[in-house]
Amino acid sequence: AQKVTQAQTEISVVEKEDVTLDCVYETRDTTYYLFWYKQPPSGELVFLIRRNSFDEQNEISGRYSWNFQKSTSSFNFTITASQVVDSAVYFCALTLNDYKLSFGAGTTVTVRA
Amino acid sequence: GAVVSQHPSRVICKSGTSVKIECRSLDFQATTMFWYRQFPKQSLMLMATSNEGSKATYEQGVEKDKFLINHASLTLSTLTVTSAHPEDSSFYICSASRHEGGRTSTDTQYFGPGTRLTVL
């Protein structure tokens, strides 16, 4: 069975600080897919990124960047120059070929002005 | 693209009544839809997987007679909470799965805005 661990429950930063969210996963499968979702206070989950197990390239999208390291089974997410609008709960998730998502517990990010 | 709607966004009902929640993929056809439940400050718990034209697959511990799922078309799935009780009060979220190619060819789940159910 697969498992996703987000050890950080809450992170609080001041605007313009960088924040890194940790995600560690466990699976015995060699083919899997990793995701990050954002859940703002409104409740809707917003898709941010997906990555397959064969693609270890890091990715940058605006102020967001992701670091995928198979050697440590981690898929960390960094928000650069954080803004108040980044305040949300962020979920890391993993799926195998059955497409069911296994979510981590989530990390609540609070960005203070 | 990849917009999923959910209706209603909020519902309050009396104990013993049934509540229907609709989930629609607005700009794509979803072969699979998923229903989740989320308690305050907790992660999402998968309740069931719904495929168009077939019976839903429920996760262990989820009562299929309590939570009726109908997937009538490639763009619509409904969840009916039958004989609702206060312990059914929760945030229910649906997602619709869309296959996407490109760098990572797989299905991606897009989520609806959720329905907050309060049973009095």
Image: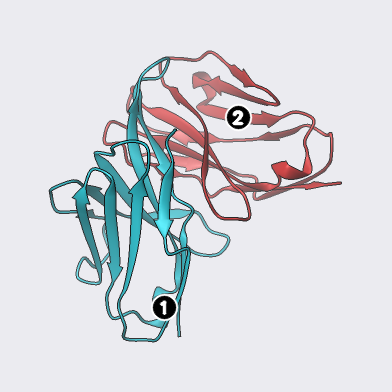
Chain colours: A red, B cyan
Question: Would you call the spot at circle 1 few (<14 residues within 10 Å), some (14-19), or many (20 or more)?
Answer: few
Compared across the picture, whether A66 is left or right of B60 comes to right
Q: In which quarter of the image is residue A18?
A: top right
SS under mark 2 = strand
- Chain of the residue displaying label 2: A
The image quadrant where one finds the C terminus of chain B is: bottom left
**Relative to residue A105, is residue B79 depicted above or below?**
below
What numbered label is drawn on residue A76?
2
Residue denoted by label 1: B87
The x, y position of residue A31, in whole percent, is 33, 23
- Chain of the residue displaying label 1: B
From the viewer's side, name the closer residue of A65 and A45.
A45
Residues tagged by mark 1 and mark 2 found on one chain of the structure = no
Q: Quadrant of residue B23?
A: bottom left
What numbered label is drawn on residue A67?
none
**Relative to residue A66, is residue A22 depicted above or below?**
below
Cα distance in 3D space between marks 1 and 2: 35 Å
Question: Would you call the spot at circle 2 few (<14 residues within 10 Å), some (14-19), or many (20 or more)?
Answer: some
Residue at image point 58% right, 60% down: B41
Compared across the picture, whether A42 is left or right of A52 comes to right
